[in-house]
Structures are given as C-alpha cells and as structure tokens.
Image: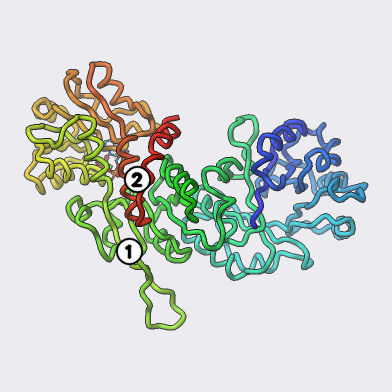
Amino acid sequence: MSKICLCLTAKTISRNLELIEKYRKYIDMAELRVDCLDPDENFLIRHFPKQAGIPVILTIRRKQDGGNYLSGEGSRVALLSRGLAFAESDKRYNFAYVDLEEDLDVPGLEEAVRTFGTRIIRSYHNFDGVGKITEKIKSLRKIGDEIAKVALMPQNLNDVLAMYQAGRETAGMEKIIIGMGPYGLNTRILSEKLGSFLCYTSETEDPTVPPGAPGLISPKDLVEKYRFRDINSATDIYGVVGFPLATTYSPRIYNTVFSREKINAVYIPFPAHNLNYFLKLAEDINIKGAAVTIPYKEEIIIHLNTVTESVKIAGACNTVKALGVLARSLPGETGSVVWSGTNTDTLGFTESLLNFLGRKNLRGQKITVIGAGGAARAIVSEIHRLKGKCLILNRTAVRARELALNYDYTWGGLDSQALDRMERYSDIIIQATPVGLYPNTNEDPFELYHFNGHEAVMDLIYNPLQTAFLKRAMATGCHVLNGMDMLLRQAKYQYEYLLERDFPEQLIPALLDSLQK
Ligand code: NAP
C-alpha cells in the first residue's frame, strides 16, 4: 500500500512537529527537509525521529535539485552525518530513511547508514521533463536494498503516460515515482496504481511554510478529497478534462458520492493542453469516463463513436464514457477505446432555470445569452426547445451568428450596437462565458449594459458565487441565480450516465453546503 509522507519545510523543528500533529491522522511518515531549516536548528535534527513518533526521511536538498541548500558538498555530508550519528538500538529513534542523490558518492556514510538499519532512497530530479524513466529507475540504485526515486516534471499528459508505462515496466521494484507540477497531480493520487512506495504531501494552508516541490497537495486533500486510502488496483478512474482547469468542483462532488455509496472509484482532474494526449492516457490507465470542460466541449465530438441526441442538438459534449475496447488485428498493439458522449449541461440548465423562474417553459420570454461556446450551445438548444426567443451576443460575433442561425435567432457582438437589441431581449439574461471566473473575479463580460432591475439574471459561473456581473445586477434589484445549482443538477445526470445508477439525491443539500463553503 502506497504510504503518505508529509514533506516538512518549516524553518524550525518545533513548527515541523506542529505540522506532524496537525496531519497525524492522515500520514504514515514524514520527510525532514533540513535545507529549509534556520541554520541554528541544524543542531536539533538528530532527535527529530524520536520527537516525531513516525518514520522520518532525512533530506538535505541542494538548490539544483529544487531545494534550498547552497553550501558545498562537504558541509552537506557533515550535516547528513550529524543527523545519522550515534544510532540508537531502538530503530524508531533513528532516521528510517535518508535521501541521497544519484551523484552523491559517500561510501563510508552509506555503509554506516546500512549498518544501523536506515534505508537509502536514491533520488533523481528532473525539472525539465521526464527523460527515459524506466532506464533511470533501473540504473539508480547502487545496492539492491535502496529505493529508487524519480521526481519528474511532466510537460504534458504524454509524459504522464510514459510514467505509468515505466511504473509497469518496473513492477515489483521498490521505487518512488512522482510527477511534479499540474500534469503530475494524477500520479500523486494514483501512487498505488503507479507502484510508488510513497506519495509526498505538504502543508498548504500556512503561507510561511513553502511547498516542498511544485504540485504537492495536503495530506487532508489527498485522503478526504481524493480517497487515497481507498484506491487499489481495482479502483475505477473517472475524471474531468479541460484546460487550464484552474477551478473544478466535480472531484469533491464525485468523490464524496463514491465514498458515501461505497463505490470503488476515484475522480481526478486531468488538465490537458492537448486532447489527444488525454485520450491516449485514458486508454492506457483505463479511465472509465470523464466530464469535458473548457475548451474541449466541441473538439471532443470527433473522437466519439456514439453520441446522444443532446450532443447532436447542442453541438457540444460535456461527458464521455468508455464503452469498451476495440480489438485490433495487429498483435502487440493496444486496443482503441470506444467512446460515447452526452451533454448533461442541457438538462442541468433547464431544471435550474425553470426552478429559479417558477415556470414550466420559456414561451413568450425574450432572452439574451452572452457567449457562444460549448455551454452557450447547450443552453441555446434548450431555450429553443422550451419555446423562448433569443439574442446571442459573443465577443467573436461570427460565432454568435453561426449559433443563432441554427435556430433563426438574432445575434451580435459585445459592443454598443448590441445595447438596443438587448433592451428588447431582457426578460432573462444568461451569462455563459468564463469572464469573472476565479481568479479574475473583477472582470465583467459586458460592462456597457446597464441593468434596469427587472431582468432575471443567471450567471453560469459558480466560483465565485457572486460574479462582478451578478453583483451589478443585484445592485439594481434584479432576481439573480449563480451556476452552482446547475452544476449539481448536471452532475447528477452525468453521474447517472457514467455509473448507470441513480444519484443519491439525499446528499444534495450536504454537497451544496460544502461546495458553497
Ligand atoms: P468555452 O466553450 O471555452 O466558451 C467560452 C465562451 O466565452 C466563448 O463564447 C468565448 O468567446 C467567451 N469568452 C471567453 N473569454 C472571453 C472574454 N475575455 N471576453 C468575452 N468573451 C469571452 O466555455 P464553456 O464551456 O462554454 O463555459 C463557459 C462558462 O460556463 C465557464 O465559466 C464555465 O465554467 C461555465 N459553465 C458552468 C456550468 C455549470 O454547471 N454551472 C456548466 C458549463 C459551463 P469567443 O467565441 O470570442 O472566444
């Protein structure tokens, strides 16, 4: 079972001990990063394992490997020796592991360490890419009882795929494989599937404690948000693909439901700069299904073997499911996943809007939709089905035109010429662009428009709950709705499509409460 290791990067021993207490129930071991300590604290490192009460890795990371240690190798070796000296007969009082880089050659220290039962983690760091991972893992160890560690910076999901392949090619070897940065998050969560001995975590709430490496998450998030302790070789993988995927609430929704319903599955964000790379990775690690978000809701469609009516009508897809694998005739080649797709934004939007308005349809309603992307396509198709009349405004006017022509609706750019027309389409205004989304919370998609206080205004954004656009509408007395309700409603339909089972509706109030916090 992959272990959870808390990387300790505070300036003092006492603060590091506090962090162990804070996360004790989530962690199996800790790494004392001596390179992050104030120099005076170096005198105190020898007794740290006894104080910590869990197995501890001793690490003094050099600047070139992503640490803070700037002095020469001689003094670093002397400091390592200080931490490992005067070994006690009770092994729990000694460092359980020491991290030594592949190029550090100190046979005397290594021999002494082995004599007293401290294990060597032989590490390699690459901040520019992944390189030849399998070869590196196989060649790192100087002696068979060492644990090979590769900390790599994948530049895309193709690099991540190579990491999983290397994990399989080195099956049975004790090793640590870490993907740093945003693309590597899934390798941390799926550490068990990767065959990694441990997964590093870090304090993330205290800004005075620096992150140990790019992309580390807290032990609490790893366990509570991403179900780390429940993941095993049989765990089904689901996720969300998009870019940059800075904020997504769906892992919290799904993983909470998986946990409560005792489903052996995990839901992971996959930021993907290239959709093809995601699909290749999905095939390799057997992703069962995924939510699709900005900017891939339209691009995904050409990769799908079957689509539901909602995708055909909206011209956008927000959910894909792996139906199985097509066997290919050539021996040795992997199969190719058969994907089906649906769009649950449509039903989620309709339920949310009609509930908000207290209506059964949109007959007689004149509606402005701002945006012409994937979400706008889905909601315009629903407005049409519900008999509403619509004006579509978009930054790129030609995209608004393209969408509007499908329904014989009117269209325009986000400019002063649109204002007159918008006055005639102002029963309901729907904001369907990412403008105002966290972290750019001060942005407003159409500042030129002044609310008159009678419009019903819906913003699809749910983070923040009140966008600058909604705040402006509220200030004039408009009735407003954010995207949270729609998010949960579409997630319910998405879950039912992907898992082929009912969504536990009784969990909705608690989910809503936790997401709003
Ligand atoms: P998308 O396919 O990437 O479309 C983005 C749209 O926003 C395009 O029309 C684009 O205009 C416009 N846009 C982007 N940046 C802009 C800017 N700086 N100024 C003006 N317009 C800009 O994205 P999407 O999937 O439709 O998602 C849109 C929003 O809806 C996102 O915030 C998403 O989180 C939210 N959403 C919420 C839910 C929910 O359940 N609550 C569901 C789906 C989507 P151009 O054509 O000119 O590029």
Mark 2 lies on residue:
491
Asked whether mark 2 lies closer than 8 Å to ligand 1, one says yes
Left or right: where 248 falls relative to 350 = right
Q: Nearer the viewer, residue 390 or 249?
A: 249
Q: Is residue 230 above or below residue 387?
A: below
Left or right: where 56 falls relative to 363 = right
Left or right: where 84 falls relative to 291 = right
Which residue is found at the position 33% from the left and 40% from the top? 487
Q: Earlier in the sequence, mark 1 or mark 2?
A: 1
Q: Nearer the viewer, residue 179 or 416?
A: 179
Q: How is the image coloured?
A: rainbow
Q: Which residue ends up furthest to the top in the rendered image? A: 476
Mark 1 lies on residue:
339
SS for dot 2: helix
Which residue is found at the position 55% from the left and 42% from the top? 221
Which residue is found at the position 55% from the left and 55% from the top? 231
Instruction: Work out how far the residue at label 1 is from the one at label 2, CA to CA, in angstroms.
Output: 19 Å
User: How many discs appear?
Assistant: 2
Location of the C terminus by quadrant is: top left
Q: Nearer the viewer, residue 262 or 80?
A: 262
User: Label 1 sits on what residue type?
Assistant: Trp
Ligand 1 image-quadrant field: top left
Residue 342 sits in quarter: bottom left
| Image marks 1 and 2: residues in contact by CB distance under 8 Å | no
**Residue 131: x %, y % from top left:** 57, 63
**Residue 220: x %, y % from top left:** 59, 40
